[in-house]
Image: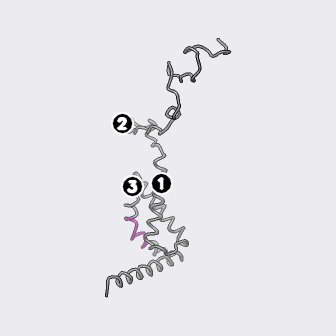
Amino acid sequence: MSDGANTSGAEEAAARADLRVTEALRQGDEAAFARLVDQHHASLRRVARLYVSNRAVADEVVQDAWLGVIQGIWAFEGRSSLKTWIFRILINRAKTRAAREGRMVPFAGFGGGPPDRARPLRKPSAGPRDLPGASAPGPGGGRAAPEGDRRVAGEPAAGADPS
């Protein structure tokens, strides 16, 4: 036999196995789900860890991915292997979680914990003073007068109450 025939036979066998597992999951077979979890959970956790900050978050992402598998098993069309579909769910959930985690500031960053454990807050990428055309702080820490304003620093504007 040639390698092509062996590959084709192996692919057909894997597709049949995926179909059996998919049908079992659709019928609510908990043992089939437990076998699937036993087979893929460790690998899913390792992949999730590549996207998120720590093990606890990775575990949450994997758990969320398993819920996605259960909820979406009726949508699985078999265009890829079941394993590929499960990992795609995991990666999408992990990317979403990583993006959300990146937008969060840890509570320790607010000075609620001991100083040696607090992490510094990140500087915002573009604050109002960092925008093009923003004026620099003027004398005494205030904002500089707009261009064309001829007042002396500390002098009230024309028509302002001097008291």
Residue at the spot 47% in from the left edge and 51% down from the top edge: 99
- The label on residue 55 is 3
Q: Earlier in the sequence, mark 1 or mark 2?
A: 1
Q: Quadrant of the N terminus?
A: bottom left
Q: How many other residues sit within 10 Å of disc 2, few (<14), some (14-19) or many (≥20)?
A: few
Percent x, y of residue 37: 42, 69
Of residue 23 and residue 146, the one placed in the foreground of this image is 146
Q: CA distance from mark 1 to mark 2?
A: 28 Å
Apparent side of residue 57 relative to residue 156 in the rendered image (left or right):
left
Q: How many other residues sit within 10 Å of disc 1, few (<14), some (14-19) or many (≥20)?
A: many
Q: Are marks 1 and 3 in contact (CB under 8 Å)?
A: no
Residue at the spot 39% in from the left edge and 61% down from the top edge: 47
Percent x, y of residue 134: 53, 30
Percent x, y of residue 151: 58, 15
Q: Nearer the viewer, mark 1 or mark 3?
A: 1
Q: Label 2's element?
A: loop
Q: CA distance from mark 3 to mark 2?
A: 23 Å
Q: Kindly identify the amino acid type of the residue bearing the numbered disc 1.
A: Arg
Q: Quadrant of the C terminus?
A: top right
For the stretch drawn in magenta, the main secondary structure is helix
Residue at the spot 45% in from the left edge and 53% down from the top edge: 98
- Tag 2 residue: 116
- Tag 1 residue: 97
Apparent side of residue 29 relative to residue 4 in the rendered image (left or right):
right
Q: Kindly identify the amino acid type of the residue bearing the numbered disc 2.
A: Asp
Q: Which residues are magenta?
A: 35-43
Percent x, y of residue 125: 47, 39
Q: Nearer the viewer, mark 1 or mark 2?
A: 1
Q: Quadrant of residue 8?
A: bottom left
Apparent side of residue 74 relative to residue 41 in the rendered image (left or right):
right
